[in-house]
Structures are given as C-alpha cells and as structure tokens.
Image: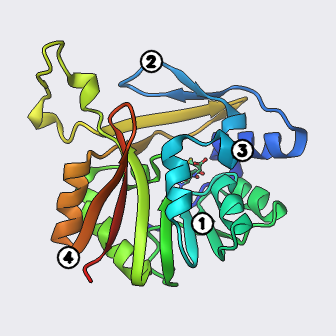
Amino acid sequence: MDNALLEPRKDPMGRAIADYHSTGKAAKLRVLSSMFYEDEIPVATLFRTMEEMPLLEQTMIQMARGRVLDVGAGSGCHSLELMKRGHEVVAIDISELSVQVMRERGVDARLTNFFDETFCEKFDTILMAMNGIGIVGKVERMPQFMLCVKRLLSPGGQLLLDSSDLRYIYEEEDGSFCVDLAAGYYGEVDYEMRYKGIKGASFDWLYIDFETLAYYATVAGLKCEKCAEGSHYDYVARISWHS
Ligand code: SAH
C-alpha cells in the first residue's frame, strides 16, 4: 500500500495532464465526493505559472531554499518555477502519466510514492502544494507521515504546506461548530475522479486545520509554525527541526 502507484488506465488526472501537455487542451476533469456536489478541476490550472498561482502558493515558492522535493507534483508547475529560481528540484508522483509529462518538461521526476520507505534522500525543503498533505488520507496516518518527513528532511530542513480548515462546512450562522465526533476527523474527505472514459478509484484526502497539524508535528518532536493565512480558512505552515 505504501508504495502503490497509479497505472494510466486508472489515472483520470494523469490522462488529463498528458492530454493538455500534448495538445494544449483537455476534456472535463470531474471530481466526485460523497460529501460535496460534483465539481470540476480546470486542467489548465494544473499548468499554472507563478503569476497564476494563489498567493499562498507564491508564498511557499518564495520561502523555499536549497534542494527541494516537490511531493505529488502533477504537471510539475511548482518544480519548474523553483528550477527557474536556481533550486535543485526532485519531483515525485505516483502517476506514471504525470511523471512522463514532467520529464518531457525537463523536471527530474521520479515515479515514487511519498510513503515508500526505500526513498530516503535528503532535502532542504519539502513542498506539498495544493493541499498536498491530502495524500495522508486519514488523520490516524499523521504519525507515519511525520516519520517520512523526518526521514527526508536535511538538518535545518523545512516542510512547506498549504491546507484548509474544513470547519466552515459545519459552521452554523451563529459561528458555532457542529460535527459528529464519532464520525472521525471532519477534514477527512473521499474523492473520485473521472476523465473521458477513465474512472479512478475512490481515495481518501485529508484537509487539516493548523492546530491538529501542529499537534502531530509536536508529538513527532518537530516545530510547526503558521506562516501565512488566506482569506478562507486556508493557511501555509512550516514544519522544521527544533534548533
Ligand atoms: N502539486 C500539483 C498536483 C496536485 S494533485 C499541483 O499543485 O498542481 C495531487 C498529486 O499527488 C497527483 O498528481 C497525484 O498523482 C499525486 N499523489 C497522490 N498520492 C501520492 C503519494 N502517496 N505520493 C506521491 N504523489 C502522490
């Protein structure tokens, strides 16, 4: 499970990225969830430039230093911007199709699952953009995630991530907050993607509020700081070693 990869026939997003890369256009990339109305990811946004990135992503790019690991890198949009700025970058993704596209775009991309324990190079910055920490899936997997972070961080290294506190979905008009505590952590979402005839498997995707993130970082002996806040319950955090 921890080194699972995505083969092309089960990879809607990878196929959309490959289509857009080779033809400059793509069909609708649909996102389904048992918790939300059906949505769509405009495939062009997966190829965004620095100017087109949300402010929080621009902040993370500016905070990057040294050798960077771009986790779940997709089309490689952040990797390419970081390379332009002189960083040595390694991109990892479980999507064969996306890794192929990144290689064609000149990125050092590896077909690697973040949780694969045999991947143990060191990085000064680990970047998880577009809620890349979503790959953790369920909050119970946070301790395992922190172990991976510690394995990959160089001394003095940092993990930069953006995520959102999904509490707004459960907030009442008076500001009170109503969740079913027996139902698990409220940031755990299930998604399924579809593109053309390709139907991906359903997967767990985690959105984590800053306090919960900081709790797991602290338990793992790491430091966790909030670096920026967006306009809608979103934020950038930096996790690093204690000096
Ligand atoms: N970071 C990119 C893409 C985000 S989509 C961007 O901001 O545009 C999330 C990506 O993570 C997908 O390409 C998916 O294939 C990849 N992914 C999912 N689980 C992963 C894992 N365990 N390890 C590495 N990559 C993973």
Measure how far apart labels 4 and 3 are at the Cα level.
Answer: 36 Å
Q: Secondary structure at mark 3?
A: helix
Name the residue nearer the viewer: 131 or 85.
85
- Judged left or right of residue 70, residue 22 is right
Mark in front: 1 vs 3: 3
Q: Hey, what amino acid is under mark 2?
A: Tyr
Measure how far apart labels 2 and 1 are at the Cα level.
Answer: 30 Å
Quarter of the picture containing the N terminus is bottom left
Measure how far apart labels 1 and 3 are at the Cα level.
Answer: 16 Å
Q: Are marks 1 and 4 in contact (CB under 8 Å)?
A: no
User: Which residue is identified by label 2?
Assistant: 37
User: Which residue is identified by label 1?
Assistant: 92
- Judged left or right of residue 51, residue 239 is left
User: Which residue is identified by label 3?
Assistant: 47
User: Which residue is identified by label 4?
Assistant: 221
Q: Hey, what amino acid is under mark 3?
A: Phe
Q: Hey, what amino acid is under mark 1?
A: Ile
Q: Is mark 1 within 8 Å of ligand 1?
A: yes
